[in-house]
Image (spheres, rainbow, N blue to C red):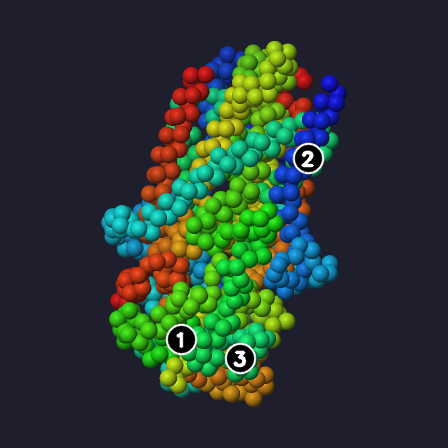
Amino acid sequence: MENSMKAKADANLFKAPKTRKFKSIKIVPYVFIAPAIIYLFIVTIIPAIMALPISFTDWTALTPRMHFIGIENYKRLLHDRAFFQSILVMSKFFIAVPLTMAAGLLVAMLLNNKLKGMTFFRVVYYSPVITSTIAAAILFDWFFQPTYGLFNSILNMLGIPGIGWVSDAKTAAMSVIIFVVWKRAGNSMLIYLAGLQGVPDMYMEAADIDGASWWQKFWYITLPLLKPANIYLFITGIISTFMIFQETYMLQGPLKSTETVVYYIYEKGFTSTEMGYASAMSFVLFVVILIITILQFKVMDVDANSN
Amino acid sequence: MKLKRLLSLAICVSMLVVVFAGCSKKGTQTTGTENKKTDIIYWQHSSQARDDMMKTLAYEFMQKNSDINIKTEFIPEEDYSTKLTSALATNAAPDVFQVESGMIPRLVKADAVQPLDETVMPSDKIKSDFVPAAVDGLQVGGKYYGMPTDMQTIVLYWNKDLLKAENLDAEKGPQTWDELLDWAKKLTKVSNGKMVQSGWGETGYHPEVQAFVYTNGGKMTDDSGKYVFADDPKSVEAIKFMADAYKVSKVYDTKFMATWAGFRQGKVAIMLGHPAMFGNLKKTAPNVKLGIGLVPTKDGKRVTAVTSWAYVASKKANSSASTKWIEYLSSQDVEKRWTQNTGELPARKALINDADLVKDPQVKILLSSLNDSKVGSLQTGALNKIWSDAFQKLILSDAPFDATLKQLQSDLNTEASKDLK
Amino acid sequence: MRKNKINKNIILYIVLIACSLLVIVPFAWMIFSSFKTVEEFYYMPPKILPKKFILDNFKELFQKANFGLYYLNSLYVAAVQVVLDIIIVTTAGYGFAKYDFKGKKVLFTIVLATTMVPWVATIIPLYIMAYKSGVVNTYFGLIFPGLADAFSIFLARNFMSTIPTTLIEAGRIDGAGEFKIFRVLVLPLTKPIIAVLTINKFIGSWNAFVWPLLVVTSEELRTLPIAVAKFSSQYYDAYNLKMAAATLAIIPVLIVYVSFQKYFVAGISLTGIKE
């Protein structure tokens, strides 16, 4: 890739300026995005296109053969109570997105200074992200133990009676959300740290001279400049929430209290070997996510324009 | 700066070269018949003990059968089905592999597996040599499609010290249903409204419930494989007994501790479980004085439930070679060594009282559970999930018992109907 | 005035340390657990420190479980994926950020849409493709599906859009070609983003489980997460080995992170404005 780009760049140097600028600018963007588009096409789009017809079959994936059954799967989906319940469960998890972002922002702002030891803290706060979800989930499973688990022990020390955490259907989802936030906040922190670098000291100094308060500086200077970060984190956060799987696979609450959509799809596809049905559910989910994301873009773009 | 870029470019290019060079198949996939051997690719779901044994067995088999080449691949157990499904979906399946025995009807229907070669393993030999409960579930249309592995029954475990503390017979353990419930209540301790000791950690794991259903003379399915337990009073009685133990007698609380973790810590007194837990407990809870017994009797009868996996051969495998390999793995000598090394039960009748195996009196008890056994239903991931979700409803929510049970039966039948032709 | 500053700093440190406990405790637990025997995992109440610091778990990992091989495999795969990821993502990010072209919105939506299809639906078709192309159980098959993802492209695009167009125009006026502008003017300014991409991709690659599980059948190609999965079976969870493996697995990732996070040190500005 680099080689061909280099060659192209070299070739351009020998062309006459005017024609080169005109011609190359036309196709250049396509060249830039080509590797990514081709790659995604092969690795995601083609498999997705293959999966679509599968959703109209009764495929069990136990054999390459499948039979066309029309929209049976989709019709079945409309009556599938468990599917809708899993969507309900998953919507509880959306709260994890603003929580993660807020936690990340808080830490990033605390760390955005030149004091000694910041590197240490940066490593510390990011370490949950680095850890494998499986290992971290095992740890949290122990911490969540109602009797003798770390969290309840701490609550008891503060004189508060312990709660059931994952073993109680009422608090299971909340517990997994705590785990998710713990695990992912570091990622937001990283993005915000990178974003905060783009806040020129000049602006802050000018604001200080004008006598602005900490909150005013934050609200009027920092936050607007963090807009790209916020948009990115929010949109990808919502999409990632739809895709939560490992966390709920490892920490399962009773009475389906942590059964999210992808988990349900996985169960149907691999455990019950109903791949056709699982594909149909996947596409419905895809459309839902797509619509929500497009809506988000519209909402956020409106803001950008008014700025 | 320029040098750095050049350097990173060089590294990048060389990596790409290596990647593409690595295009050639690495790894021990079969390439066909270089030396007139038949290749059998075998997938084993992995555990340290099994893996070591399997390597030895493959070697020995190849010594005895010079025309067959066994290639073993060890797959992590938790995600075995994901991998197997993908392979089956592409016809990339191994020649011999393991499946939950409940999956056999569906695999047969999908035409993904073949019956055992009669000339290598005749059906009547299978019927006569093996415990009926071990092989009954492995036949479809009169033909055997696999041989049992990872055989498990249900037995009773208890903590001798906890029983002694209540003046209960710690050597014999609870013998009847009434004793079980009675002792469980005595062994459950609550302090300040919170449980501090559980008498019987029962959560409705299906083989356990089935063992009780069978013991009570009930049945899970009729002869055609349709689930009928909700309409059978003896089955309902057994299931209610277990559900009420939790709900009414409150001998366990899911908010207390995980059942086995609690047992290991001496906080749960009695547990039903698989014989495989015996080896596990010796390692993970050496301080618990373990009592082992059979499923408690009802009216003098006891029947335990057998669940197992099976070795099966895929459709495209060489029939006689794959059956020979399966036959070897099920041979008496190999089964005996397998039991000794992995703690999994054998399936052959002759081994139940084998002198070497029964030297350990506790192992003797585990083996004897095979004598009164019946094959368990619900042996697929999907059925298991439907069952456990429903049982959770029974014990953790206020859902009405009869209605929930009937709904469960109906859901199970919907799922099972996908396998009946 | 000076006292005020010192007070502020002290408060800052206190808050940071307090919050970091939330993170350090689980982490320390994991590390200490690698020195425990398997029974200690079942102690109630759980104790954070092992009875004795034994190295048996690590020995078993390397001697019996072939850990060294998996480690090297994971390193190799991660390295290749990181490099290729950076190339693919920065070029695409730049293309989407700094150019206007026909179909830009549609293409970008398609790019983002690739993250919205649950892996459950696409994993088997992808496997089928890999199988039919003959790349199952090869390094190529293992590496290729993990090269880039749309989230990173989104991120790169967002950040690159803050690069002043004036800079690029200046390059054009000077007569530089588009690719030269990208390489010489733009890339150096995107160090923070490249650092983020490196860290993210390395972690993603390092912890990837599902695809390697499916595509690798022979021992020689196995990566770390598969090794850890092997330690659980139906009846026995080798928690001690799992924690030891998890602890060892963190080391390269930590190294990558520590090395690259310095690009976020206060003072390096994305836009080149002098501090």
Quick check: A19 left or right of A13?
left
Within the image, what quadrant is residue B137 found in?
Answer: bottom left
**Label 2 close to label 1 by CB (< 8 Å):** no
Residue at the far front in the pictured view: B192
Q: Is residue B363 above or below residue A295?
A: below
- Residue at 69% x, 37% y: name it: A120
Q: Please, which chain is the residue tagged with disc 3 on?
A: B
Q: Nearer the viewer, residue A250 or B149?
A: A250
Pointer 2 residue:
C14
Q: Residue at x 35, y 58 (%)?
A: B398
Above/below status of A35 relative to B252: above
Where does the image place residue C274, in percent across and percent down from the top left?
67, 16
Q: Which residue is located at x 48 percent, y 84 percent?
A: B368
Q: Quadrant of residue B204?
A: bottom left
The amino acid type found where label 3 is placed reads Leu
- Residue mark closest to the camera, 3 vs 2: 3
Image quarter where the C terminus of chain A lies is top left
> Hey, what amino acid is under mark 1?
Ala
Label 1: which secondary element:
helix
Residue B304 figure quarter: bottom left
- The amino acid sitting under disc 2 is Ile
Q: Would residue A159 appear left or right of A172 to someone viewing this image?
A: right
Considering the numbered disc 3 on the image, is that residue within a helix, a strand or a loop?
loop
Residue where numbered disc 1 is placed: B211
Residue at x 42%, y 78% (from the top left corner): B178
Q: Which mark is residue B168?
A: 3
Question: Cα distance, mark 2 to mark 1?
Answer: 59 Å
Q: Around disc 3, counting alpha carbons within 10 Å, would you say few (fewer than 14), some (14 to 19), or many (20 or more)?
A: some
